[in-house]
Image (cartoon, rainbow, N blue to C red):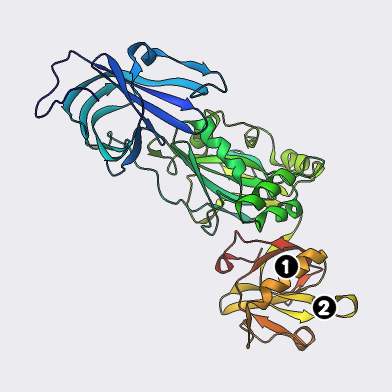
Amino acid sequence: MGATTKGKRSKQASPTFVVQEHHATALHWDFRLERDGVLVSWAIPKGVPLDPGSNRLAVHTEDHPLDYGTFEGQIPKGEYGGGKVILWDHGHFECEKWTEREVIVELHGSRVSGRYVLFKTGGRNWMIHRMDPAPIGWEPMPEEIRPMLATLGSLPSPDRGWSYEFKWDGIRAVTYVEGGRVRALTRNGNDVSEVYPELRGLGQQLGATSVVLDGELVAMDDEGRPSFSRLQNRMQVRGASQVRRAAAHTPVSYLIFDVLYLDGRQLVSDTYDERRSALESLDLDGPDSVVTDAFTDAPGEKVLEVARSGGLEGVVAKLRSSRYQPGRRSDAWIKVKLTRTQEVVIGGWTPGKGSRQQTFGALLMGVPGRDGLEFVGKVGTGFTSDQQDELLDRLRSLTCESSPFAGEVPSAHRAGATWVRPELVGEVRFTEWTKDGQIRHPAWRGLRPDKDPNEVVRE
């Protein structure tokens, strides 16, 4: 660590520092300070912090020669530190204190400037802390931004000032990428980062760039179209080994259509066009992620026809001058469906008959209304035998003595019913709503663990 300096700044004239982004086995940043003819070095897994409220781990490593401070390139695989090295920042620093357990410096770089302290916590482990306030205008990444929701409707007319995107048949996920680490939350706030390891590639792609992205996790069928039934194979999987097998058998892609935070600035108050421009500048297309197309010049009818011919769910029209409204269902985004689907809350089941005697015959469905859970019919088709077995196991753990529905369930539907607590959300395809508020000809599509029962709405 070199000689001890305490209580005054170093007399050394403009010693240098360097930060190298190192895409090794695990992405990290090598932080190096010139001292006594060498570069004293720490590996910082999440990068140099800009937030004074955040301490980050810094692992002390071996000293490096001064000429290594200009290295940028590829270390061959198999060699120590194998991987890509990017010269992320460099400059000079002033040393205020240097002991065996604490180092205080003021950095002067193009990307990072300010007073920092490194302090030893045990063994090779140190922490790095920013002592100055955050840069002017810089905001920390928010812990959670609830996704903006679209209203069901028709294509806007006239459609000038609107952009059109395809509607994808998957799971909505807002993804937070910081220091190369990825965290993904579904609509109901569940963290699915470990369930979908395909998202980790975004951390490698973005490096030190900090972003919050909005998009859809989608599984494709053999024709390259989104398949909700295939995605069901991933939704319920837990445990590292099961996740690995499921990811190999049923890979998913992250289709990105919005950016809500970028390098210290929240973008939710920016217009759709401004956010779209920022998103496209990030170059996020990779093996497991892609920025989806936005059609700002084509008429909505043509985009809808392309969706129809491609077997897609429909389109979403987005007002180009609109701001992002976290957690709100807004008419600035309009979803135009080609197939009718409805999220439903399961309130019970009826016994099976014939070949279904060992399982249920139909699920009793509800949608939250003004007075509580409103009964909207039952669904008895569209299940695979595996789905029925899994559903029955989960439903049995939720059984209760009384009906969860606010009103009286028609006697034809409740005969022999077993009631359950209304905690599971599913999705059905159907033809229309009847005059008395029932779903006509429903077919089961699958469970929606990403949805909160209280947020289900009639569409």
Tag 1: amino acid: Glu
Residue 396 coordinates in the image, percent (x, y): 68, 78
Residue 150 coordinates in the image, percent (x, y): 59, 53
Q: Which residue in the rendered view is the most extreme toward the right?
A: 354
Residue 455 in sight here: yes
Mark 1 / mark 2, whichever is N-terminal: 2
In the drawing, does residue 35 fall left or right of residue 328? left
Tag 1 secondary structure: helix
Q: Which residue is mark 1?
A: 390
Q: Which residue in the rendered view is the most extreme toward the left?
A: 7
Q: Which residue in the rendered view is the most extreme toward the top?
A: 67
Q: Tell me, yes or no, whether the two marked residues, 1 and 2, touch with CB atoms within 8 Å.
A: no
Tag 2: amino acid: Gln
The C terminus: image quadrant: bottom right
Residue 277 in sight here: no
In the drawing, does residue 59 fall left or right of residue 37? right
The N terminus: image quadrant: top left
Q: Which residue is mark 2?
A: 358
Q: Is residue 188 above or below residue 322?
A: below
Q: Residue at x 51, y 28 (%)?
A: 24
User: Which is nearer the eye, 172 or 442?
Assistant: 172
In the drawing, does residue 64 fall left or right of residue 227? left
Residue 129 coordinates in the image, percent (x, y): 27, 38
What's the mark number on residue 162? none
Q: CA distance from mark 1 to mark 2?
A: 13 Å
Q: Residue at x 52, y 39 (%)?
A: 272
Q: Residue at x 59, y 74 (%)?
A: 369
Q: Is residue 265 above or below residue 416?
A: above
